[in-house]
């Protein structure tokens, strides 16, 4: 790919580069879809982000995200309680669940911050 980029002329370089990137993206997506290890029905659903015009689709997506984070936190607390009560000696699983829930919560907070920033930017736009 680098060889192809270096051989491009100055005139159509941007268009050729964009075309190559789109081809690479399509190829990577096809590889992901064909690999059973990465099977995910959301990849095959073109309306997964609520672009279908269904009322509340974006709201449902955010609600599902919050529910998943809450579930991870509950699992983490359950694993920690099992270790503390002596019901389990698998401290590794407890720590992994704790880190996973912390990371998921951090991601949720960052998504919320980006949404708030986007809303504020839209409100600043002149009409």
Image: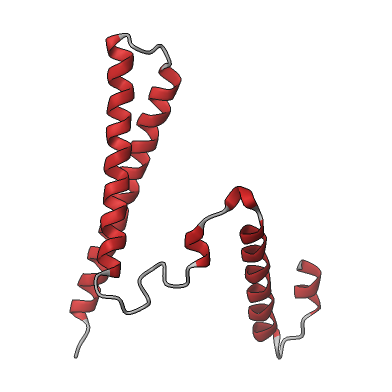
Hey, which quadrant is residue 85 in on the image? Answer: top left
The residue at 30%/54% (across/down) is 64
- Residue at (19%, 79%) from the top-left corner? 124
Residue at horizontal 65%, vertical 63%?
28
**Tally of marks:** 0
- Who's the residue at 33% across and 11% down the image? 87
Answer left or right for 99 relative to 119.
right
Which image quadrant: the C terminus?
Answer: bottom left
Choose top left, top right, bottom left or bottom right for residue 94: top left
Q: Is residue 69 above or below residue 10?
A: above
Q: Toward the viewer: 116 or 78?
A: 78
- Image position of 105 with respect to 98: above or below: below
Q: Is residue 46 left or right of residue 14?
A: left
Q: Is residue 106 or residue 80 the one in the foreground?
A: 80
Q: Is residue 6 above or below residue 126?
A: above
- Is 34 located above or below residue 47 in the figure? above
Picture quarter with the N terminus:
bottom right
Q: Position of residue 112 (x, y in %)?
A: 26, 57
Q: In terms of image quadrants, where is residue 105?
A: top left
Left or right? Give the position of 36 relative to 50. right
View extreme (top): residue: 86
Of 111 and 73, nearer the camera is 73
Position in image of residue 53 (x %, y %): 32, 79
Q: Position of residue 92 (x, y in %)?
A: 45, 20
Q: How is the image coloured?
A: secondary structure
């Amino acid at each position: 790919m680098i060889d192809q980029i270096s051989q491009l002329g100055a005139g159509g370089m941007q268009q050729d580069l964009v075309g190559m990137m789109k081809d690479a993206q399509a190829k990577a997506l096809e590889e992901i879809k064909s690999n059973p290890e990465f099977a995910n029905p959301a990849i095959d659903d073109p309306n997964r982000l609520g672009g279908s015009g269904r009322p509340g689709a974006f709201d449902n997506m955010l609600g599902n995200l919050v529910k998943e984070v809450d579930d991870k936190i509950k699992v983490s607390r359950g694993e920690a309680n099992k270790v503390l009560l002596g019901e389990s000696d698998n401290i590794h699983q407890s720590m992994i669940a704790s880190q996973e829930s912390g990371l998921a919560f951090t991601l949720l907070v960052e998504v919320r911050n980006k949404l708030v920033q986007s809303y504020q930017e839209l409100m600043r736009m002149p009409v």
